[in-house]
């Protein structure tokens, strides 16, 4: 598998979080992340665990479960696990790959660097988090 530095920045095409970033910033995003491929059924995040990384779905899909109950499925262009990195709390949900899925993994420090270095991407990510929080409060 290629290292993050060998990946084509075009893998980020269509990712809403990075719609406003140029080629150099895309290369930086790839340098801050690690490519990962997971099989169908693989557990990415386990509810209650310490948040150490988050994932950007490049292809495939993953499902989110809270206390074993299905909540949602998300696909390419979606991020999972970032809330735990932002609020420093244990995982609030488990995430399982629905099918073979390609991801970019961001460890905590690299995710913080991404947010610090790319204000536009940071705004998109934080707006998505706020939307999720608002939807969860409405339940």
Image (cartoon, rainbow, N blue to C red):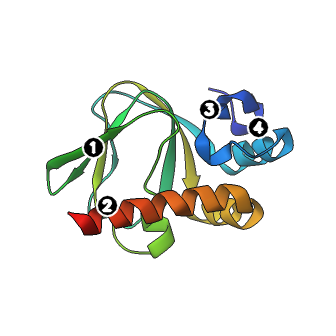
Q: Nearer the viewer, residue 49 or 116?
A: 116
Residue at 67% x, 55% y is 121
Callout 3–callout 2 Cβ contact below 8 Å: no
Mark pair 1, 3: CA separation:
21 Å
Give neighbour class at mark 3: few <14, some 14-19, many 20+ (Cα, 10 Å): few
Q: Which residue is label 4 attached to?
A: 5
Mark pair 4, 2: CA separation:
37 Å
Q: Which residue is label 3 attached to?
A: 14
What's the mark number on residue 72? 1
Occupied quadrant, residue 84:
bottom left
Q: Nearer the viewer, mark 3 or mark 2?
A: 2
Mark pair 3, 2: CA separation:
24 Å
Q: Nearer the viewer, mark 1 or mark 2?
A: 2
Callout 1–callout 2 Cβ contact below 8 Å: no
Where in the figure is residue 31, as x and y percent of width and height? 74, 46
Mark pair 1, 2: CA separation:
13 Å
Mark pair 4, 3: CA separation:
20 Å
- In the rendered image, the quadrant that contains the C terminus is bottom left
107 vs 69: above or below: below
Occupied quadrant, residue 34:
top right
Where in the figure is residue 35, as x and y percent of width and height? 59, 37
């Amino acid at each position: 598998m290629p290292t993050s530095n060998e990946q084509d920045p075009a893998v980020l095409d269509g990712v809403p979080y990075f719609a406003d970033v140029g080629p150099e910033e895309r290369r930086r995003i790839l340098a801050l992340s690690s490519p990962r491929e997971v099989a169908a059924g693989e557990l990415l995040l386990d509810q209650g665990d310490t948040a150490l990384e988050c994932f950007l779905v490049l292809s495939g899909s993953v499902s989110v479960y809270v206390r074993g109950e299905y909540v949602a499925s998300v696909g390419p262009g979606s991020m999972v696990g970032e809330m735990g990195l932002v609020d420093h709390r244990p995982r609030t949900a488990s995430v399982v790959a629905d099918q073979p899925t390609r991801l970019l993994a961001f460890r905590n420090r690299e995710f913080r660097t991404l947010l610090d270095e790319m204000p536009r991407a940071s705004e998109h990510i934080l707006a998505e988090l706020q939307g999720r929080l608002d939807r969860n409060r409405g339940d």
